[in-house]
Image (tube, rainbow, N blue to C red):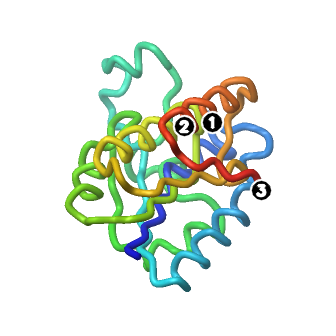
């Protein structure tokens, strides 16, 4: 079975930077465990990076969320913690200027993946966006999200995102 793990935006700015939140740092060990298991099973690892430039305040997102974050090359843009140690083992990295990556969706569609797992941040924004794109790109794939490998500063929005994911037949695994 062809499997891929997508680590979505587990970047410093979303953990302990400008958009960080309490508890986000605790995902590091869980994400590393998911990476180890995927690689041990012969699966593929990819990362997404929320990526912004100097023009961010002039974008739709920047006007809606006026918090500078994830500027390409900054400390906040880099992967967080021990998760960053796996960068050299990634098959691909996708920079994306907004929530979902159309390039990633095309990569999934072309790749013939039978199982797609996603983790990272933020559950109710970038994770759910990429889950929905993955479902559209690979309608017959098994898609899995471990609830303890994603999170949000807003617990209610996190739960709502998990509900949306379940509604498109994503397996949301508790624990």
Q: Which residue is mark 3?
A: 175
Question: Closer to the camera, 96 or 125?
Answer: 125
For the point 59% across and 51% down, the residue is 145
For label 2, count other residues whose C-alpha is less than 10 Å away and answer few (under 14), some (14-19) or many (20+): many
Bin the neighbour count of mark 3 within 10 Å (Cα to Cα): few under 14, some 14-19, many 20 and up.
few
Percent x, y for residue 26? 77, 55
Q: Earlier in the sequence, mark 3 or mark 1?
A: 1
Gap between marks 1 and 2, in whole Å? Answer: 5 Å
Q: Where, quadrant-wise, is the N terminus in this rendering?
A: bottom left
Instruction: Find residue 58 and report its horizontal and vertical position in percent.
Output: 31, 18
Residue carrying label 2:
165
What residue is at 70 percent from the left and 31 percent from the top?
159
The x and y percentages for residue 11 are: 55, 51
Q: Are marks 1 and 2 in contact (CB under 8 Å)?
A: yes
Residue bearing the label numbered 1: 162
**Eyeballing the image, is 63 above or below 156?**
above
Judged left or right of residue 105, residue 66 is right
Question: Sequence-wise, which precedes: disc 2 or disc 3?
Answer: 2
> Residue 143 in the image: x percent, y percent?
48, 53
């Amino acid at each position: 079975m062809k499997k891929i793990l997508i680590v979505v935006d587990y970047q410093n700015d979303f953990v302990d930077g400008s958009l960080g939140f309490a508890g986000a740092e605790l995902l590091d060990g869980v994400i590393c465990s998911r990476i180890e298991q995927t690689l041990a099973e012969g699966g593929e690892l990819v990362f997404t990076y929320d990526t912004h430039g100097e023009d961010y305040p002039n974008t739709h997102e920047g006007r809606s969320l006026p918090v500078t974050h994830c500027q390409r090359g900054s400390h906040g843009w880099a992967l967080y913690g021990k998760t960053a140690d796996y960068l050299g083992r990634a098959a691909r990295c996708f920079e994306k200027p907004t929530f979902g990556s159309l390039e990633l969706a095309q990569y999934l569609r072309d790749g013939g993946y039978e199982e797609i797992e996603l983790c990272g941040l933020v559950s109710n924004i970038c994770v759910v966006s990429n889950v929905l794109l993955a479902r559209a790109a690979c309608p017959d794939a098994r898609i899995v999200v471990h609830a303890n490998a994603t999170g949000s500063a807003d617990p209610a929005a996190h739960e709502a995102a998990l509900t949306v994911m379940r509604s498109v037949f994503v397996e949301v695994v508790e624990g």
